[in-house]
Image (tube, rainbow, N blue to C red):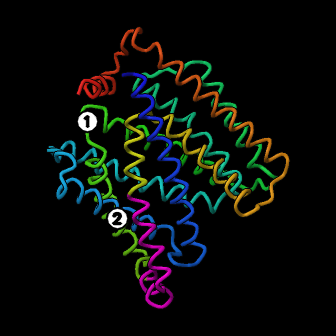
Amino acid sequence: ERKMGSMEGSVWLGAYIAMNLFTTVLNKMLLATGGLPFPSTMSLWHYLCSAIGSVFMVRVLRVTEPATLDLSAQLKLFAFSILFNVNILVSTASLHLVSMALHQVVRALVPAFTVIIMYFWLHKKYSTQIHLSLLVIFLGVAIYALKGEIDYTTFGMSLTLFGAFLAALKTVATNVFMVGSLKLHPLDLLQYMCTYAAAQMLVLLLLNGTLQETLEHLSTHADSYTWTLIILNGVGAFLLNVVSFVANKKTSPLAMNIGGIAKQVLAIVFGVVWFHTEVTPMSLFGIAVTSAGIGWYTMVSFNDKRPAEKRPVDKTPDLEAGRAKESQG
């Protein structure tokens, strides 16, 4: 049963990496062609599609019984949606203050922040080998990403580090909502979070005029190809969010972080093979080091889970209790 659970988690994680890569390509196509020139508008579109899709799945198709939540739970979910939006806004802002290469390297620290958050919030400890594998992954990313263009301000670096921390916190919080005391189904969590987040983003874009600019742009520039890309992008975002939440529940926040880095490596390899993008020997070496670190992490993670049945159950209150109950169901 433990082995089947690990295999199921691996399948969902693989699906997450594939959908992440697919949606990233669609995002870049829309931004490059000018279909949706504003990243914040694209985020709003993703929220709306995910909210509509998840509400339809839960309320109409009844894929799962809708959760009954009290005011306290609703407030927690509202705060969670704010975290999602702040994470997006901070990440977007930091991109304008540091070079892309440095931004990529700092984002490789997300797994480290996740380990810290898991320790202080959930009292989860990782083995020395896990820590070392994360170090190898970070060094690999630094090798293939840094090519001399290190440009930043002190504020920009601080904001980028804060964004990496928020990304880690978001992933851990997502997991806790599903395996902690609330034990929300991924679709339940998605419908509440995306509905709240869409409302917040809509107000922001109305206030700063971005929504009006986007609508004017679409009315004059969008053709059938653009609308096809926009629709595919929305559907892809909904599927990515579903797969992401399920994979997070079936695996762990740290595994999701590693999956995100694996997606970056696959994107580079895809660019080399498909678009014949030129890469330097140093970049190839960095990709190899990163891949080795990911492989090491995967091997150690599976080995750590193998004897887990024989070890005393961790006393982390909500997290482990939720997972134990789920495995019995």
Q: Looking at the image, which residue is at 27% across and 54% down?
A: 191
> On screen, 116 above or below 56?
above
Give the mark, 1 or 2, whose residue is nearer the N terminus: 2
- Residue 307 in picture, x, y percent from top left: 46, 12
In the drawing, what numbered circle is on residue 49?
Answer: 2
Q: Which residues are magenta?
A: 213-238
Q: Amino acid at mark 1?
A: Lys
- Residue 266 in picture, x, y percent from top left: 64, 49
> On screen, 215 above or below 192?
below
Q: Looking at the image, which residue is at 29% across and 47% down?
A: 189
Is residue 24 within the magenta segment?
no
| Disc 2 element | helix
Name the quadrant containing residue 308. top left
**Which residue is disc 1 drawn over?**
183
Q: Amino acid at mark 2?
A: Cys
Name the quadrant containing residue 185. top left
> On screen, 59 above or below 217?
above
Looking at the figure, which quarter contains the N terminus? top left
Name the quadrant containing residue 28. bottom right
**Label 2: how many Cα within 10 Å (few below 14, some 14–19, many 20+):** many
Q: Nearer the viewer, residue 173 or 295?
A: 295
Report whether 8 appears left or right of 278.
Answer: left
Q: Looking at the image, which residue is at 53% across and 40% down?
A: 257
